[in-house]
Amino acid sequence: MNTSKKQPESISEMKRQRTANKNAAIVMTLLFVALLTGNLAVSAPDGSLDIGDIVWGGLSVVAFGGLLWSLYVSYKQSDERQQLVQLKATSFTFMIVIFGVVIAQILHALAIVSLNITVQIIVIGGILAWISLMKVIEHRSN
Amino acid sequence: MRNTLAVLRAARKWSQADVANQLGVSRQTINAIETGRYDSSLPLAIKIARLFEVRIEEIFILDETDNAQNSR
């Protein structure tokens, strides 16, 4: 069967993509604001929390909460094959992240790396791995 | 598992998007089913059969290789 990529998308898929794009824009804005606040917040020399730290922490939690919510909404609006693709990508990413965290803990125990920074790298890498895996699985199933 | 979805769809001159709209799934899912890269769930198979007004067995055909794999 010849399936051109120019074919129109179904109504349900267009609706799902619109919602996903809208949610992505909101989450990206929140993440950007949290990043800016993090840059502006200057930690006190004695290590005590000031209002800037609290605002930055709160915004980061809200931004990542928004990310999880948008992923959940996208999952719920997907059809059964798309949900399968997302679940496969999630399970592989879970394995990668767990492995990364274990390695980071070992390296931290050996005083080779800072756990704080390594966890941040694992989180960002995990998100990128999840997106990449989803694209690969989606491509292979089409 | 192979299927006659593409044949049935062509007979009605429906596009993949037309079928996808009526079933509430993405066009890629219809394409994946037609090309045999994805086996639909039973509820979706029933919806497809109802849409084309045929029995499920007339759309989805179990291959001998599928039987051999399941009996292992």
Image (cartoon, coloured by chain):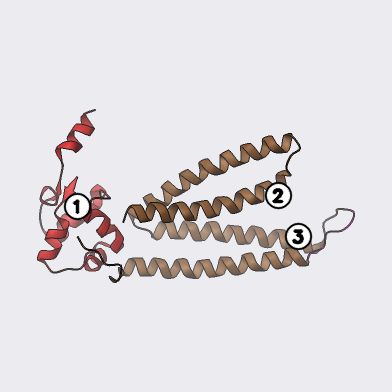
**Residue at image x 80%, y 63%?**
A51
Q: Residues within 10 Å of mark 3 (few under 14, many from 20)?
A: few
Residues under labels 3 and 1: Cα distance?
54 Å
Disc number for residue B26 = none
Find residue B21 and report its horizontal and vertical position in percent. Answer: 26, 67
Residues under labels 1 and 2: Cα distance?
51 Å
Q: Quadrant of residue B23?
A: bottom left
Work out whether residue B25 can be spotted.
no
A16 in the magenta segment:
no
Quadrant occupied by the N terminus of chain A: bottom left
Name above or below for residue A31 compared with residue A124: below
Residue under label 1, please give it.
Answer: B46
Q: Residues within 10 Å of mark 1 (few under 14, many from 20)?
A: some
A43 in the magenta segment:
yes
Find residue A30 and report its horizontal and vertical position in percent. Answer: 62, 67
**Residue at image x 29%, y 58%?**
B29
Query: Among all residues in the image, which is located at the extreme top?
Result: B72
Question: Which secondary structure, mark 2?
Answer: helix
Question: Which secondary structure, mark 1?
Answer: helix
Residue under label 2, please give it.
Answer: A117
In this picture, residue A6 sits left or right of residue B65: right
In this picture, residue A5 sits left or right of residue A101: left
**Residue at image x 19%, y 52%?**
B46
Which kind of residue does numbered mark 2 sit on? Ile
Q: How many marks?
A: 3
Q: Quadrant of residue B68?
A: top left
Host chain of mark 2: A
Which kind of residue does numbered mark 1 sit on? Ile
Check the rendered structure and report the hue given to chain B: red
Check the rendered structure and report the hue given to chain A: brown
Question: Which secondary structure, mark 3?
Answer: helix
* Magenta stretch bounds: A41-46
